[in-house]
Every structure is written in structure tokens, then in C-alpha cells.
Image: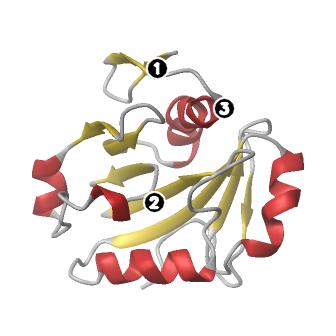
Amino acid sequence: MPLTLPDGRRIRLSPGKHNQVQKAVIEEFAPRFAQGARLLYLGDTAKKNVLMDQRILAGLGLPASDHDKLPDVVLFVPDRRWLYLIELIEAVTSHGPMSPKRVFELAEYLKSTEIGAIYVSAFPDTATFRKHMKDVAWETEVWIANVPDHMIHFNGDKFLGPRK
């Protein structure tokens, strides 16, 4: 499956629903909601890390060697110093949505950095979102690929932005 990265490079992902959502996150979500973002990490169902910018991750104080703790996609907006941590949710998923437990795990992973974290659960469609909605943590964001212009904010007083 061909994928155009934010910097214009083209790569190929293995076929499957997970990577279809991943492709949508990079090509649809990022230009709409993370303008100017750099792709720091991208997994693949066949290869664990298709892309990993270890230099920038290390510069942000994140141990890039422990990719099992990373979500499926990591985007970084340097001007705002925002780090988008995106879990992809398809029919069967390893982590599930940004649940309270997953947010806690990622917050622990990020505790050595001053970067603002935005936790996003990405779903292929509204039916899949409805199945997992009860597990989505407060203070996170939801993006659904079949309605790419909109987000659901599980935030009380704040729209898209880090919590610090």
C-alpha cells in the first residue's frame, strides 16, 4: 500500500485494515489537525518500525530504543512543541484506544520531557468507534477516518492541545 509521508517521501506499507487507518492518519489527519508535523515514528503490521527518527526522539528526551512503548504513530509539531501520540483502532488491536491505563503508561514514558502530549485514538469508521467508545479516556482526542474533517474531544475545558 503506497503512502506519501509529510515530507513528500513515498513508502509502501503492508496491506491490511490497520495500515489503511495509518495511511489515513498520515495523509488526512496530519494535514488537517497537525499542520507542520514531522513524522517521528510509524509502525507497520509486517515490520514493527517502518520509520523511526531516533535522533529527534532522543533530542526530545524519549528513549527511542524502546519502540514497544510507542503508539502506532508519533507526530511532532516543532513550532508548538506538541507531540501527537496516535493509537490506531481497527477491528482487532494490540493496545485499544487511548484508555486511562494507556494514557498513564504513555505519560510515564514521557515524564522526562517538557513536550506537550496530545493523545489520539484513530478509528476507521464510526461503527468501530462505537464499539470502543466506553474505553476512551477523558482528556484525549478521537479521529474517525470516514469523517476526516471532524474530531471528537474527550476534553472538558480545552480543545486540541496538550495537557500540562
Q: Residue at x 55, y 48 (%)?
A: 33
Q: Nearer the viewer, residue 24 or 130?
A: 130
- Circle nearer the N terminus (3, 2): 3
Label 1 sits on residue: 3
Return the disc, 2 or 1, that comes first in the chain's sequence.
Answer: 1
Q: Which residue is mark 2?
A: 85
Q: Amino acid at mark 2?
A: Leu
The quadrant in which the C terminus is found is bottom left
Q: Quadrant of residue 98?
A: bottom right
Q: Residues within 10 Å of mark 2 (few under 14, many from 20)?
A: many
Q: Is residue 120 left or right of residue 12?
A: right
Rendered residue at 51%/55% (across/down):
86
Which mark's residue is nearer the viewer, 3 or 1?
Answer: 3
- Alpha carbon separation for disc pair 2 and 1: 19 Å
Residue 17 - label: 3
Residue 100, position as x, y percentages in the image: 61, 82
Say which label, 3 or 1, has the lower sequence index: 1
> Which residue type carries mark 1?
Leu
- The residue depicted at 43 percent of the width and 79 percent of the height is 105
Residue 110 drawn at (x, y percent): 31, 76
Q: Residues within 10 Å of mark 1 (few under 14, many from 20)?
A: some
